[in-house]
Amino acid sequence: MFLGIVLFLTGCALQKQEQTPAISAAANVTPSFVIPTVRERMLYLARQEWELFGRPEVNYDIDPPAVTYPNEATHGLEKLPPFFSRIFMYWYAVTDLPIIGYEGEIRPWSGAFIVWLARSAGVPESDLPSTVLHWDYIQHVMAAGSGNRFVGHAINAYAPKPGDIICAPRGEAFIQSIHNYNDLRRGAYHCDLVVAQRPGELDVIGGNVLDAVSLAHVNLDGAGKVLPTKARPWSLAIEQQN
């Protein structure tokens, strides 16, 4: 009887010793999912908002540029309540200024959209400040230097990739005053996020493009540099380094 009890206890001890390494090994298993990077989150959010607006695409090869929707019954016009609620969210995520102007108009919100993408993806204020004006973050990026997450380049000196931002001046008189990267100064700009890259072409998504979050195709030269056009005289590429 005594011998049986000893053998039983010995067997339990051996079984416990055999199980311990397996438990320890399981504790060191790497999770099966990968947390998206800031760049990947910005890309996902841009495409999500584009889908919500009905997937509009802008054609800059015609004058004036025109927008088309896959479903003609779905037009993401900014004044319609479902879409204005999204614009309201972009705007007040980055500013306390009123979104409605003095004449009852919705103020330009393309800058708020880009900053909302960055902030929602986890970009800190120190890398891209909260603002509704593209120039505010352009100026910040140009002054911050190479240590910042975002670094500015002349449009003919850098080949953008998904997650980067490209910018163009707006307004005929302002456009004519900018001849190169060194001429960039405070004024009206439009910027889009690069979401896809193919030989000879980029896909970009931006806010307040013909009253929607819209996608456009941007032509590239043989070296992958953006080709400015009359409708979008691209002047600046903002590289996202991480």
Image (spheres, rainbow, N blue to C red):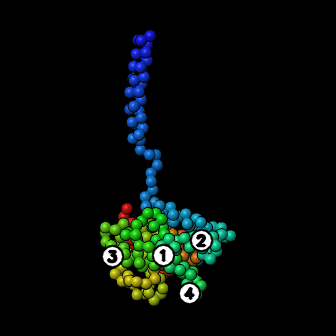
Whether residue 183 is situated above or below residue 221 in the rendered picture? below
First of labels 1, 4 by sequence position: 1
Q: Crowding at label 3, few (<14), some or many (≥20) Cα neighbours within 10 Å?
A: few
The three-letter code of the residue at mark 1 reads: Thr
First of labels 4, 2 by sequence position: 2
**Towards the viewer: 184 or 60:** 184
**Towards the viewer: 49 or 236:** 49
The answer to whether one can see residue 196 in this image is no
The three-letter code of the residue at mark 2 reads: Ser
Callout 4 secondary element: loop
Callout 3 secondary element: helix
The three-letter code of the residue at mark 3 reads: Ala
Q: Give residue 143's mark.
A: 3
Q: Position of residue 85 (x, y in %)?
A: 59, 71
- Asked whether disc 2 touches disc 3, contact meaning CB atoms under 8 Å apart, the reply is no
First of labels 2, 1 by sequence position: 2
Q: Crowding at label 4, few (<14), some or many (≥20) Cα neighbours within 10 Å?
A: few
Q: CA distance from mark 3 to mark 1?
A: 22 Å
The residue lying at 61 percent from left, 67 percent from top is 54
Name the quadrant containing residue 9.
top left
Nearer to us: label 3 or label 4: 4
Query: To which residue does mark 2 refer?
Result: 85
Query: To which residue does mark 1 refer?
Result: 95
Q: Residue placed farthest to the top in the image?
A: 1
Query: To which residue does mark 4 refer?
Result: 102
Q: Position of residue 170 (x, y in %)?
A: 47, 82
The three-letter code of the residue at mark 4 reads: Tyr
